[in-house]
Image (cartoon, coloured by chain):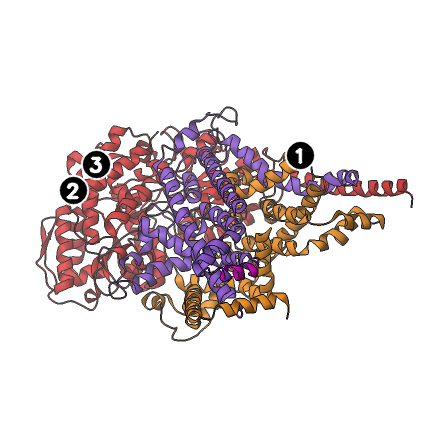
Chain colours: A purple, B red, C orange
């Protein structure tokens, strides 16, 4: 049997492997190579890849650019806040649906809906809402909450505008994952807990949460990756004005704001970006997986 | 079925699958060798046009050229901010354009890559001669020695005014003298005028003003036209390019005589921008405190930079409906105004933008404060360049097309009538229906023009104007209420200078 | 009474606090309204002119004239764009399902250190930001003569592979070998074995792969922008972007943008309302594995 499958390995695996190599692996390796050169998009300074080799120069310049450092910090800040807000909102929604029992299909439909819609298209709508509707509603003649007015005209406020928008878009999706996790918890556990006299909070803390850890791992992974790599919403709301570029956008701007366009520098930034996402992503999976085991 | 035959059966099937996969792989790799210059098959040469203004007209003109010559020409126009990336993609592809657009800001990239033909080495003698006739100041080059392109046209900007508004403010017989004296007036006179017009709009009365030493008294009663005014300037606070790029270019003109000088500037030269930029900030303070809104003055603050209420379109709308006396824009605004109000088209004209400079602020040889304040910036926004990496035949045909477009009767007619472009070698025989074009031609014939050193600022004009100067103004000054102080002017200038120096290498 | 229903009833009886339930219900309704607000806002403002949108964004339109909607549909070439977007999505997803399922099957059936490394590489690709491959990728496909619609489909195929192989791999491990052996003894060929026996067994995860990939491919903007740019045939998102750029490079023509966004989201919303069960199931399955 093993021999049979072995014989067929290449013919069946090859289409996928070729596709993966052509679209991800080869460009990634080429990108790695180019990040050490003075690549200008349509040519290499000096004529070829090898003559334009600049060593670690592109990498050395990354952290000299305050825009990149700012984008890095901004991305991390946003991600930290957004991951917490999205996961907690999703968990609360899931718990409420679970608590409300049957006939919650309509709510589930509504909460998941924003996830279907593109970040760019809805970003335009949200831009108008933040700029004009919020400013009207929360202005001096309205509820007078200055923090919620002109949110796209300030570095910090815009961070929260992005959090609001991303929560709106992602919470429903994560809620579905939590609902599935909640359904997998054997009800006997709650009954046992009730018999032991555990209250609502205790049941949540000692039964629900530990049993939900596999869902937490997935939700954190998806929100972390999504937030770190966020682009469309960033472009739609401010396009980087008021020092609001996140890393994805900043890399695009590096090319736009240099002449001749410094693709080598942008490529080095992208490599650093990948390392950052990979480290954070893997660390998160490692830590939450460990908690799953502990629980 | 015995085991052996089954194995053979599998083996045959296996090879079918392998063959299918290899075909897929081969199709992925096909076209690999096509990067060398190879003659195109479905057209004779290809024009990449990076300007949307003449996109439709260029198609028509090229159709005529095709009929005349029997050639097939591919044209692709794209003029948004993404055209640079698209052009790069086309330059990387097997179907490279033979003629492409670039300008002083973008030329270094193509010069360095070797994709742009120096027209000093053009194979077509007529094109070579044409290129040599391009005035020195308008030539496309990296360091002043090359001659890389044939200019599309000339554009310019200044304070656009509807002269009927001047007539209703100061009287019919005063209109022409006012326009002449305004051109010669000093910045201080201009400032007094702006404040007086502001008072007149608010109170219906204002003391008379002096321009070029002559006195102008306001009409005692507002007319139907002047009672519409809500401010002196139609501003677009959401658009950083209107002040970062265009007004920034005014300050740069005091220090750099051309884009090439700005591009090769030393740190010491960049430092010399401090005084002109501080004075520019003072001017922008004046503009933004006299901005027109839909129902009254527009105040600085969050709504001043709101992309819905303070966009380019809104500012053109305010001006077209007579809410503002001036709009600082270029001749490209003409079609936009035509869509909104055709009545004011014939009476539009350009007046110069003024800065409160002193002679010691000016570093350009032969330029005086008086001359600066009577001139408008005029420049070539885009050039036709020949791609040195297409086949010799395509290069030859591309050169012949440019010769035809710029020297033949039909070609020159196309530029003026179809494109509505001011030719770079304009003379007094060229007249347009477009009053703004005519006004720019007059400034040019009088020699009252400034240049576009802005295109020599970092990233070929693609960075400093909007991302440094524009951002400082928009994100820290226009977006809040309250007066600006002399210290603010200096801060704006200092940070704009620093932002330039930060990206010099 | 089934066991599940019994425990459910037990749980319900342990929560007798009516006020608590009402409070939760009220919060849910408020959250749902907040979630729907941007969409209702979008809907209402798709029937107003620019001036009214800016002056009274919260008011109902004076008339429900479809002029702005039909104008927007014309400007974004709605029918053509939907057709192209749907075509790209369907073909890309088919390619992903085809390649990912066969590859995962082979990786599971040929478990070895080498195949585990391949799996790790594919999984790690989920963490690669698009920015770190996009310029070389476009460059490469340009060279291959594939900077066009077929090329775009291949790119989606490659990008969707990582997550899809990960999902399939987890599922195939649970498919018993015995079934396949039995089919082989009955004399079916490898392709017959795969399509007639194995593939139907993993249908639940195929639904997941289809749903999750369709969602991002349908809405993707950057890749079509880089590959197709201003080509004649554009995806829905790209049409939207160019409509905004061309009609107001320097402003926000809301009377065009709002109805354009509205019509552009209608196909996927309608699809969702009909196939909701599969959407929810797809997300759930994808998360449990």
Residue pointed to by mark 2: B487
Camera-near label (1 vs 3) is 1
Magenta span contains residue B441: no
Magenta span contains residue A192: yes
Where residue B158 sits: x, y (%)?
A: 26, 49
Dot 2 crowding, Cα within 10 Å, few <14, some 14–19, many 20+ = few
**Quadrant assignment, res A246:** top left
Dot 1 crowding, Cα within 10 Å, few <14, some 14–19, many 20+ = few
**Chain under disc 2:** B
A209 w.r.t. C105: above or below:
below
Q: Which residue is more in the foreground, A178 or B448?
A: A178
- Is most of the magenta stretch helix, strand or loop? helix
CB-based contact (under 8 Å), mark 3 and mark 2: no
Magenta span of residues: A186-194
Secondary structure under tag 3 reads: helix
Secondary structure under tag 2 reads: helix
Where residue B210 sits: x, y (%)?
A: 10, 52
Q: Quadrant of the N terminus of chain C?
A: bottom right
Q: Which residue is more in the foreground, B496 or C10?
A: C10
Residue pointed to by mark 1: C114
Residue pointed to by mark 3: B274
**Chain under disc 3:** B
**Chain under disc 1:** C
**Quadrant assignment, res A250:** top left
């Amino acid at each position: 049997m093993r021999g049979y499958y072995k014989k067929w390995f290449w013919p069946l695996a090859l289409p996928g492997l070729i596709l993966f190599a052509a679209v991800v692996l080869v460009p990634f390796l080429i990108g790695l190579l180019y990040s050490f050169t003075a690549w200008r998009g349509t040519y290499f300074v000096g004529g070829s890849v090898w003559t334009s080799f600049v060593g670690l120069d592109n990498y050395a310049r990354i952290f000299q650019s305050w825009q990149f450092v700012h984008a890095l910090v901004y991305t991390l800040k946003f991600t930290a806040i957004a991951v917490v807000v999205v996961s907690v909102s999703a968990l609360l929604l899931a718990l409420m649906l679970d608590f409300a029992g049957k006939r919650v299909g309509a709510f589930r439909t509504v909460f998941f809906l924003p996830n279907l819609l593109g970040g760019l298209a809805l970003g335009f709508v949200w831009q108008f809402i933040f700029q004009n509707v919020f400013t009207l509603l929360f202005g001096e003649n309205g509820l007078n909450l200055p923090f919620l007015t002109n949110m796209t005209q300030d570095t910090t406020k815009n961070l929260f505008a992005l959090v609001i928008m991303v929560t709106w878009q992602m919470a429903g999706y994560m809620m579905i994952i939590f609902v599935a996790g909640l359904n997998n918890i054997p009800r006997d556990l709650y009954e046992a807990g009730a018999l032991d006299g555990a209250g609502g909070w205790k049941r949540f803390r000692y039964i629900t949460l530990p049993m939900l850890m596999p869902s937490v791992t997935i939700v954190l992974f998806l929100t972390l990756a999504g937030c770190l790599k966020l682009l469309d919403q960033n472009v739609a709301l401010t396009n980087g004005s008021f020092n609001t570029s996140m890393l994805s956008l900043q890399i695009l701007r590096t090319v736009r704001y240099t002449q001749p366009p410094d693709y080598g520098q942008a490529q080095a930034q992208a490599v650093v970006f990948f390392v950052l996402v990979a480290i954070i992503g893997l660390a998160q999976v490692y830590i939450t997986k460990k908690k799953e085991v502990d629980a | 079925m015995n085991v052996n035959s089954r194995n053979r059966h599998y083996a045959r099937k296996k090879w079918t699958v392998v063959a299918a996969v290899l075909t897929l792989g081969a199709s992925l790799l096909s076209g690999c060798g096509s990067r060398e210059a190879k003659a195109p098959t479905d057209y004779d040469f290809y024009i990449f046009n990076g300007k949307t203004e003449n996109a439709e007209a260029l198609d028509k003109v090229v159709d005529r050229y095709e009929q005349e010559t029997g050639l097939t020409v591919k044209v692709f126009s794209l003029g948004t901010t993404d055209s640079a990336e698209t052009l790069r993609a086309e330059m990387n592809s097997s179907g490279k354009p033979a003629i492409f657009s670039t300008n002083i800001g973008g030329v270094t990239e193509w010069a360095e890559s070797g994709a742009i033909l120096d027209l000093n080495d053009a194979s077509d003698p007529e094109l070579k001669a044409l290129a040599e006739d391009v005035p020195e100041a308008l030539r496309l080059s990296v360091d002043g020695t090359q001659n890389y392109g044939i200019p599309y046209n000339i554009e310019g900007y200044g304070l656009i005014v509807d002269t009927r508004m001047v007539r209703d403010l100061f009287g019919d017989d005063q209109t022409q003298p006012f326009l002449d004296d305004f051109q010669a007036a000093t910045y201080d006179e201009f400032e007094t005028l702006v404040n007086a017009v502001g008072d007149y709009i608010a109170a219906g009365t204002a003391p008379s003003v002096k321009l070029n030493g002559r006195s102008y008294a306001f009409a005692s009663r507002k007319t139907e036209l002047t009672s519409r005014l809500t401010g002196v300037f139609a501003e677009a606070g959401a658009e950083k390019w209107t002040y970062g790029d265009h007004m920034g270019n005014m300050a740069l003109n005091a220090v750099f005589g051309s884009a090439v000088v700005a591009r090769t500037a030393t740190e010491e030269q960049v430092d010399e921008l401090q005084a002109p930029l501080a004075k520019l900030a003072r001017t922008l303070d004046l503009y933004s405190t006299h901005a027109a809104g839909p129902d009254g003055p527009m105040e600085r603050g969050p709504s001043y930079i709101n992309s819905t209420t303070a966009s380019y379109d809104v500012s053109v709308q305010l001006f077209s409906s007579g809410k503002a006396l001036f709009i600082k824009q270029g001749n490209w605004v003409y079609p936009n105004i035509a869509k909104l109000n055709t009545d004011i088209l014939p009476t539009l004209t350009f007046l110069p933008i003024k800065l409160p400079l002193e002679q010691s602020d000016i570093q350009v040889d032969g330029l005086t404060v008086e001359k600066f304040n009577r001139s408008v910036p005029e420049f070539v926004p885009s050039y036709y360049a020949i791609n040195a990496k297409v086949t010799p035949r395509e290069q030859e045909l591309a050169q012949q097309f440019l010769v035809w477009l710029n020297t033949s009767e039909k070609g020159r007619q196309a530029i003026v009538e179809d494109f509505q472009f001011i030719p770079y070698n304009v003379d007094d025989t060229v007249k347009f229906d477009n009053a703004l074009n005519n006004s720019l031609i007059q400034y040019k014939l009088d020699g009252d023009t400034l240049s576009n050193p802005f295109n020599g600022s970092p990233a070929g004009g693609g960075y400093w104007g909007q991302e440094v100067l524009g951002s400082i103004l928009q994100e820290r000054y226009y977006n809040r209420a309250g007066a600006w102080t002399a210290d603010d002017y200096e801060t704006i200038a200092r940070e704009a200078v620093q932002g330039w120096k930060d990206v010099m290498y | 009474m089934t066991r599940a229903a019994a425990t459910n009833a037990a749980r319900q009886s342990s929560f007798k606090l009516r006020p608590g339930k009402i409070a939760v219900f009220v919060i849910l309704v408020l959250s749902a309204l907040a979630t729907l607000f941007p969409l209702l806002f979008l809907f209402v403002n798709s029937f107003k002119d620019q001036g009214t949108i800016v002056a009274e964004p919260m008011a109902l339109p004076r008339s429900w004239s479809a002029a702005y909607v039909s104008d927007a549909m014309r400007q974004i070439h709605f029918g053509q764009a939907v057709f192209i977007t749907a075509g790209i999505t369907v073909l890309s997803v088919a390619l992903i399902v085809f390649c990912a399922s066969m590859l995962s099957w082979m990786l599971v059936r040929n478990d070895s250190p080498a195949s585990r490394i391949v799996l790790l590489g594919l999984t790690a690709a989920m963490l690669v930001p698009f920015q770190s491959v996009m310029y070389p990728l476009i460059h490469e496909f340009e060279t291959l003569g594939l900077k066009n619609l077929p090329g775009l489909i291949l790119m989606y195929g490659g990008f969707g592979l990582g997550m899809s192989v990960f999902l399939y791999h987890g599922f195939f491990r649970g498919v018993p070998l015995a079934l396949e052996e039995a089919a082989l003894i009955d004399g079916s060929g490898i392709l017959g074995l795969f399509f007639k026996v194995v593939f139907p067994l993993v249908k639940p995860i195929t639904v997941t792969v289809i749903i999750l990939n369709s969602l991002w491919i349908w809405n993707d903007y950057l890749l079509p922008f880089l590959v197709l740019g201003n080509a004649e045939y554009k995806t829905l998102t790209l049409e939207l972007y160019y409509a905004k750029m061309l009609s107001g490079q320097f402003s926000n023509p809301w009377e065009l943008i709002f109805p354009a966004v509205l019509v552009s989201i209608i196909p996927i919303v309608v699809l969702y309302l009909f196939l909701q069960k599969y959407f929810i199931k797809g997300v759930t399955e994808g998360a449990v594995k």
